[in-house]
Amino acid sequence: MSPADSPRADSAAATGSDSAPKLSRRGLFGLAGVGVGAGLIGAAAGVAGDRAVMAATSHASESTVYEFYGAHQAGIITPAQDRLHFASFDVGDITRDELISLLADWTIAAARMTTGGSAGTFGPANGPYDAPPDDTGEALDLPASALTITFGFGPTLFSTAGGVDRFGIASKRPAALVDLPHFQADALVDAQTGGDLCIQACSDDPQVAVHAIRNLSRIAFGRASIRWSQLGFGRTSSTSRSQVTPRNLFGFKDGTANVKSEDASVVAEHIWAAGADGASWMDGGSYLVARRIRMTIETWDRTSLRDQENIVGRTKGEGGPLSGGTEFSEPDFATAGNDDKPLIPIDSHVALAHPDQNDGAVLLRRGYNFVDGNDDLGRLNAGLFFIAFQRDPRTQFIPIQKRLAANDTMNEYLRHVGSGIFAVPAGATKGSYIGAELFA
Ligand code: HEM
């Protein structure tokens, strides 16, 4: 059956071709990949696949849209959305040109989806009747929902563990994209660690975030496959002063002292990489460190409120520092209590992570809570999927985590089981693709 004969043809005609998007490279690739001839592509090309346009949902007007193209990738200083789907990919046995075409296809699809469109040109219900739809469909009636899609390149994209330069980019690996060292008490699981590429999809609707990862993974078929992935259901950070500080699964406010997008000079100095840092193609990019941190919340829940607050260094209700004041009061690490010990214990999480103890190092934290079922002992497999952006992990995440891993009293309730580090290039310009400077 040709598209013209299909039951979808009427609605296609009604949609009209004026608003029809041009055939993307992805559309051509996808159709060629399933053996559909060029004639069929032409016959069905007048169908718009934009789910936001087709949806006419009552809440569409409430939808926030973040532009995909720009100087920096969205999803870093963007106000942290409520939901996450993060995926790390292994790249298959493909050529440099095929890797570039994957990134180009991903760019086009991501730009479409973040504005509420379908992943492909036709959409889930209007393409050639005898070909698989170029969008899976579960987000058809949903607005953009503040979707951001952020791409990163892992160390093994530049050279494999065995030192093979698969794509001719080994010499362009930024010095800041180090292999993370082993931290004290790390219990990393290989199947939840590393990866050649990563995609962070954040949205205020979980189905929109999952739809993004699912469709980008589908587009990558035969070129890259998911190595591990993580769903997050509640942000554990604020990245804008306009946001209320959320709570993590220990029940504490998380994100109070985070870098906020409004702190323009801090963001410029500590979050965005510069060409002068060494890798010119990373100008305007950032480095993402992800840690899957299991939290033994059942043990935590049997810990006294006093101990919980001393472990964090802040009050549980207000989130203020134990030295006094309200949530955003500056912590005072010097003042001692009646027992001559600092009011904020020196081995508390906040005391150890604070920039004062780390040569001024800061992180833009953008993590999420997770609960992935339960373990054999009937405990929730819960934790925090920690994500942090920074200009240079060598002077930011690594020294902070070294200090925390060695001394943090919170460690009794934590286990780092997954890890990843990725170079997140600057935003793409229209007509180009994500990371183009790396391959220039
Ligand atoms: C499950 C693990 C973790 C939990 C439950 C946790 C929880 C918290 C809480 C409740 C705060 C205080 C509120 C705030 O300012 O945001 C905080 C602050 C902070 N955390 Fe964590 N955190 C975890 C892991 C990490 C890791 C792995 C790092 C970095 C290596 C880190 C770095 C920081 C920093 C830099 C601050 C701000 C300190 C300050 O300037 O006062 N955290 N965290």
Image (cartoon, rainbow, N blue to C red):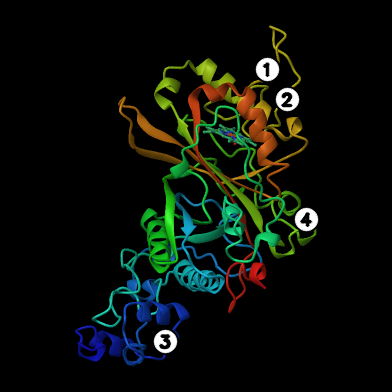
Q: Residue at x 60, y 32 (%)?
A: 183
Whether residue 330 sits left or right of residue 119 in the image: it is right
x, y (%) of residue 351?
Answer: 67, 26
For image coordinates 55% across by 27% down, the residue present is: 185
The reply to whether callout 3 and callout 2 are in contact (CB within 8 Å) is no
Label 3 vs 2, first from the N-terminus: 3
Q: Which label lies toward us, 4 or 2?
A: 4
Q: Quadrant of the C terminus?
A: bottom right
Pointer 3: what residue? 19
Q: Position of residue 129 (x, y in %)?
A: 24, 81
Q: Say which residue label 2 marks.
A: 332
Contact, CB < 8 Å: mark 2 with mark 1? yes
Q: Report if the beta carbon of the residue with label 3 is closer than 8 angstroms to ligand 1.
A: no
| Nearest to N terminus: mark 3 or mark 4 | 3
Q: CA distance from mark 4 to mark 2?
A: 34 Å
Neighbor class of circle 4 (other Cα within 10 Å; few <14, some 14-19, many 20+) is some
- Per the image, the residue denoted by label 4 is 277
